[in-house]
Amino acid sequence: MSELVEYLVKELVDCPQEVKVTEENDVVKVSVAKSDMGKIIGRQGRIAKSIRAIVKAAAAKLGKKCSVEIIEVE
């Protein structure tokens, strides 16, 4: 799942080299540059919800459960 999330996020941000995706158990954690945080979350969280929906559907197809967390880097 981390490859899918990494691909989606890198296509949305201005600094794709700053994207870091880690996967622990069934949780995919994403961190991006501070300037790109708004692009990942979107207005009222629409883009974040969409990313989570895509990952949830892909995981369900494989018979798994997976969630996505967006981590703010200082």
Image (tube, rainbow, N blue to C red):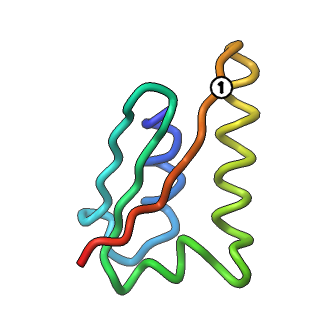
Return the x and y of residue 48 as percentages of the image width and height. 64, 64
> Which corner quadrant of the image does residue 42 belong to?
bottom right
> Which corner quadrant of the image does residue 20 belong to?
bottom left
Q: What residue is shown at x 69% (from left), y 74% (from top)?
A: 45
- Residue ID for mark 1: 65
Under mark 1, the amino acid is Lys
**Which element carries disc 1, helix, strand or loop?**
loop
Q: In the drawing, does residue 18 fall left or right of residue 9?
A: left
Q: Nearer the viewer, residue 44 or 14?
A: 44
Return the x and y of residue 58 as percentages of the image width and height. 69, 30
- Which residue appears farthest toward the top when viewing the image? 63
Task: Say few, some or many: other residues with alpha carbon within 10 Å of mark 1 (under 14 / 14 to 19 / 20 or more).
Answer: some
Q: What residue is shown at x 74% (from left), y 47% (from top)?
A: 53
Q: In the drawing, does residue 74 fall left or right of residue 45?
A: left
The relative height of residue 57 versus residue 45 in the rendered view (above or below) is above
Q: What residue is shown at x 60% (from left), y 32% (from top)?
A: 66
Return the x and y of residue 17 as percentages of the image width and height. 24, 63
